[in-house]
Image (cartoon, helix red, strand yellow):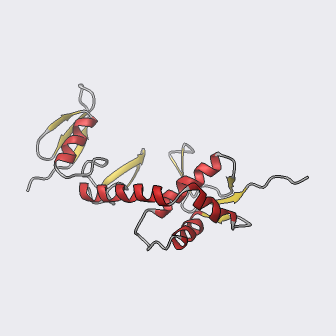
């Protein structure tokens, strides 16, 4: 069986060129993604099973669960789509309203999972809840009260492992 891990070739003068372990030379990211999909590889990590979300920070690919395979990527994408349909802003807002003081992402995600009777690992509850909490934060409904757990690449990229928020209360006169 031929291996199909695709990597970006450096030092080329023709722009962005990718090479596959099978010997194929691919001009541009789109051609690399098509080759990966044709060979049942993840189109995000191109079969390497790793991604680089920030310069110098490598981690297992979140699109294929670190497998490098297309099947897992599609399964995960479908789970994300299902989570978007099931875990809505009103659901998260209702859970947040039950907290008087600061709350953590994990607490809200656990409460949503329990409230919807979802078994652990069935859907990406944490990432979906995080996205909705960030949406609530940008709308001014909640404010983040925790500091970053890690600074990556100076202060340009920060990492929060289990961020903490607090509801914003209006002043009653």
Percent from the top left, x then y, of residue 154? 54, 45
Question: In front here: 130 or 164?
Answer: 130
**Picture quarter with the N terminus:** bottom left
Question: Which residue lies at the image location 54% right of the left edge and 66% below the top edge?
Answer: 109
- Give the mark count: 0
Percent from the top left, x then y, of residue 47? 24, 51
Question: Which residue lies at the image location 54% right of the left edge and 57% below the top edge?
Answer: 88
Instruction: Answer with left or right where residue 73 lies relative to residue 21.
Output: right
Question: Which residue lies at the image location 49% right of the left edge and 74% below the top edge?
Answer: 117
Question: Which residue lies at the image location 70% right of the left edge and 67% below the top edge?
Answer: 99
Percent from the top left, x then y, of residue 35? 18, 42
- Does residue 163 show up? no
- Does residue 144 show up? yes
Percent from the top left, x then y, of residue 65? 33, 60
105 to 13, vertically: above or below: below
36 to 162, vertically: above or below: above
Instruction: Answer with left or right where residue 171 lies relative to residue 136.
Output: right
108 to 10, vertically: above or below: below
Name the quadrant containing residue 149: bottom right
Name the quadrant containing residue 160: bottom right
Q: Most extreme residue toward the left, as rendered?
A: 1
């Amino acid at each position: 069986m031929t291996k199909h891990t695709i990597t970006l070739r450096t030092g080329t003068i023709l722009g962005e060129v990718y090479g596959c372990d099978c010997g194929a030379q691919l001009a541009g990211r789109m051609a690399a993604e098509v080759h990966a999909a044709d060979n049942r590889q993840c189109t995000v990590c191109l079969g390497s099973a790793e991604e680089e979300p920030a310069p110098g920070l490598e981690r297992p690919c979140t699109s294929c669960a670190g497998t490098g395979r297309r099947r897992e990527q599609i399964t995960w994408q479908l789970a994300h789509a299902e989570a978007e349909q099931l875990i809505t802003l009103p659901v998260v807002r209702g859970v947040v309203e039950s907290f008087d003081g600061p709350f953590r992402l994990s607490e809200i995600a656990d409460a949503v999972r329990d409230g919807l009777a979802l078994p652990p690992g069935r859907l990406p509850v944490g990432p979906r809840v995080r996205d909705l909490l960030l949406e609530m934060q940008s709308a001014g409904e909640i404010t983040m009260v925790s500091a970053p757990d890690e600074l990556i690449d100076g202060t340009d990229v920060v990492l929060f492992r289990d961020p903490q928020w607090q509801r914003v209360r209006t002043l009653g006169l």
